[in-house]
Amino acid sequence: MKLLKECIQEALEKKVAIGHFNISDTNGLWAVFRSAQNLNVPVIIGVSEGERDFVGVRQAAALVKSLREEFQYPIFLNADHTYSLEKVKEAIDAGFDSVIFDGAKLSFEENIKIAKECVEYAKNSGRDVLVEGELGYIGTSSKVFDEIPEGVDLSEKSLTDPAKAKEFVMETGVDMLAPAVGNFHGMLRGGVDPKLNIKRIKEISEAVGVPLVLHGGSGNSADDFKEAIANGVSIVHISTELRVAYKQGLMKGLSENPDEVAPYKFLRPAVQAIQEIVEKKLKLFNNL
């Protein structure tokens, strides 16, 4: 069974990307897993701090591990957007394959300090745990917005600086970097976000020498994904689109079956809606 870092390296070499999909329950987990199985590509399950509180930290780890072992399949678990060393340690101790320390709102120096501590803890865990750092603010909410979220600036001067990114990676030793390159968490109500800055993605990739992770992928165009992947992005995060699909599928299941009380029956349209989006994204990310 390949390790996550081996799958990421293969993706980088092939100029493809691994899909990272957030879940809140086993419905989402099965939808993502079956989609990846159908296409025979590796996949990453993401759980934010809020999702971990809902699912359970060790429970999420046990669920993903059970799928990997039962099916001998490259499915991995990531502790998405973790804001403290304490929470990073909790995820690593629970058995997560990777963690993100999100210090984007901290000072550059404080972000480096804590990210470095996260890397040291991961290295001493006795397992091969990857650590991702984040540099550049892209918001925090996976919601549908009428306009660019407050506090997010997509102007070129506010994007992640390649020189700063290089310094950050060298000082911390992180395995991956999530930069601000015109992306933001959530998606616009119209369904299409502003274009990514592909030139900046390429500059950062060449400066840091580690795989880049694109957060806030919901709403980005197919062309943007292809260009971003061709220029150094090896993992793409999708969350908001799945949440919207889940809700719409659930509403459909309830409206079409108003007398049904068995959750596994009225939830089927929600699972199907998630699976359709995940398969579409995985085909795109993997040039299938």
Image (cartoon, rainbow, N blue to C red):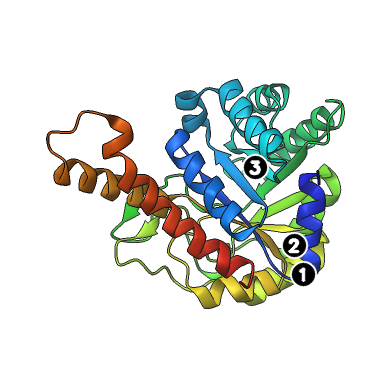
Q: Quadrant of residue 98?
A: top right
Mark 2 or mark 3: which comes first in sequence? 2
36, above or below 80, in the image: below
For numbered disc 2, what is the local secondary structure? helix
Q: Which mark is residue 107?
A: 3
Q: Residue at x 42, y 68 (%)?
A: 193
In the image, which is nearer the foreground, mark 2 or mark 3?
A: 2
Q: Residue at x 34, y 52 (%)?
A: 245
**Circle 3 residues within 10 Å: few <14, some 14–19, many ≥20:** few
Left or right: where 238 falls relative to 164? left
| Pointer 1 residue | 14
The answer to whether the residue labelled 1 contacts the one labelled 2, judged by CB atoms less than 8 Å apart, is: yes
59 vs 147, nearest the viewer: 59
- Residue 228 coordinates in the image, percent (x, y): 63, 71
Q: CA distance from mark 2 to mark 3?
A: 32 Å
**Going by the picture, which residue comes out furthest to the left?**
259
Left or right: where 12 falls relative to 78? right
Inspect this view and state whether residue 122 appears.
Answer: yes
267, above or below 217, in the image: above
Inspect this view and state whether residue 150 appears.
Answer: no
| Pointer 2 residue | 11
Quarter of the rendering occupied by the C terminus: bottom right
For numbered disc 3, what is the local secondary structure? loop
- Residue 186 coordinates in the image, percent (x, y): 41, 53
Which residue type carries mark 1? Answer: Lys
- Residue 25 coordinates in the image, percent (x, y): 45, 33
